[in-house]
Image (spheres, helix red, strand yellow):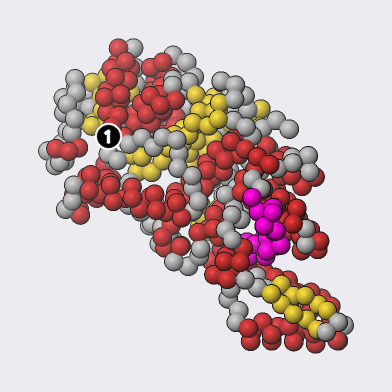
Amino acid sequence: MTLRIFNTLSRELETFVPIQPGQVRMYVCGMTVYDLCHLGHARAMVAFDVVQRWLKVSGLQVTYVRNITDIDDKIIKRALENGETIQALTHRMIDALHQDADALGIERPTHEPRAMDYVPHMLGMIETLESKGLAYRAQGGDVNFSVRKFAGYGKLSGKSLDELRAGERVSVAGDKEDPLDFVLWKSAKASEPPEAQWPSPYGLGRPGWHIECSAMSCDLLGQHFDIHGGGADLQFPHHENEIAQSEGAHGHAMANVWMHNGFVRVDNEKMSKSLGNFFTIREILERFDAETIRFFIIRAHYRSPLNYSDAHLDDARNALRRLYTALQYVSPTSESIGTSAVDWSHVQAARFKAAMDEDFGTPEAVAVLFELASEVNKTQSAELSALLKALGGCLGLLQEDPSQFLKARSVLDEAAIQTLIDRRAAAKLSKDFATADQIRNDLLAQGVLLKDASSGTSWTTA
């Protein structure tokens, strides 16, 4: 089956054809490093980590760029509040970002450019836009992009200029010719530290947020590349503005495919600091292990809303235990199987591949993992266990030692396990087989496997 990806630009599933055969160039908007990463960042990092993993499994060479914004209004404000330099703040937050990403099993991107290193590239693009009449110098020293002079503005978000103008102020601020225009270069302010100012043909200042990604993606991937990704919140205005800048400067398409992961909700409300339902990755890691968080994110489709709650994380943890319990049967001779050795004609492997080739359909792919786990529990097949582990590896899951994983997450002591075994035996005697089966399944979800024999029931766990 051919890989198909939902393209936000066309609003359709499209067959993916790389610009250069066998190679994929992908850019994903990263974090603005003024604070610790939150669950929304985790969702985006995991989503595009799965994308780049599957592209590699599909035999493609991937150049993956995920930027870091290390100069921004929020960064300057936080550094001043903390009484520290911008670099001290951003270096500390970048270290924390890497620690959180590593914990979640996120593979490092091929390139991780930082905005501060690309200011000359941004100035070059701004000068090109100015020479083409798409940018102008405002009275206060800023340089703005003239939205109405770019014919394709709104094509990504589906917003017309008239719709956008209806939501803006009628009067125009002195620095803008039109309320829809956005800043490319911000003039220096007396309240901002010297480290946030660069010399330019427009005077001392710093780049606007949108121009950063246009400059970094162009330098590392070229003017025209395969995939541009990010969170749904970036579709407008950030990605819309990126298209305007890049296509305005270069005169052709920026990216063939635009991908956006869905929002994170907390107990069915949008995650927000103002609502008090805002969680950093580290706060969640205090209550749940990293692979459980990754599994929780992956078993929802990347474009769907992700609803966070402790109950959903508990369910994900129990489900992951069931998969690891099945992997206890992997024999030493088959543990080394990797994705390159998968027989994709195998019925479950073929169904897994079909799911992933249809816009990275992780919910269906995870369902295949549970089918395999069920077969392993019935047959104790080392071959199927090896396949389960290999397919899990395509998603960055199930690569820990099963015994150690289950031991670290066991929540029942021996007395509690024996109590449940006795209760199950009593249920079987009274022919209440539904209760007996439920107890067996509950124990299995917690990494406890029952073995019935003529001499009685025994159990094993890691």
- Image: 283 above or below 30: below
Q: Nearer the viewer, residue 414 or 428?
A: 414
The magenta stretch is 320-336
Q: Can residue 93 be seen in this view?
A: yes
Given the image, on which type of amino acid does mark 1 rest? Answer: Met
Q: Residue furthest front?
A: 333
Residue at 65 percent across and 70 percent down: it is 447
Residue at 77 percent across and 75 percent down: it is 451
The picture places residue 146, in percent across and down from the top left corner, at: 34, 21
Q: Nearer the viewer, residue 178 or 87?
A: 87
Q: Does the magenta stretch include residue 274?
A: no
Q: Judge from the rendering whether residue 395 lies leftward or rightward of residue 271; answer left or right.
A: right
The picture places residue 215, in percent across and down from the top left corner, at: 36, 26
Residue at 75 percent across and 53 percent down: it is 383
- Image: 59 above or below 319: above
Report crowding for label 1: few under 14, some 14 to 19, many 20 or more residues within 10 A (C-alpha).
some
Quarter of the rendering occupied by the C terminus: bottom right
Task: Write down the quadrant of residue 111 in the picture.
Answer: top left
- Image: 434 above or below 238: below
Q: Does the magenta stretch include residue 322?
A: yes
Residue at 68 percent across and 41 percent down: it is 341
The picture places residue 247, in percent across and down from the top left corner, at: 43, 19
Q: Which of 333 and 140 is in front in this view?
A: 333
The picture places residue 295, in percent across and down from the top left corner, at: 58, 55
Q: Can residue 163 be seen in this view?
A: no
Give the residue pinned by disc 1: 116
Q: Which of 327 and 437 is in front in this view?
A: 327
Q: Judge from the rendering whether residue 6 lies leftward or rightward of residue 175; answer left or right.
A: right
Q: Judge from the rendering whether residue 300 lies leftward or rightward of residue 104; answer left or right.
A: right
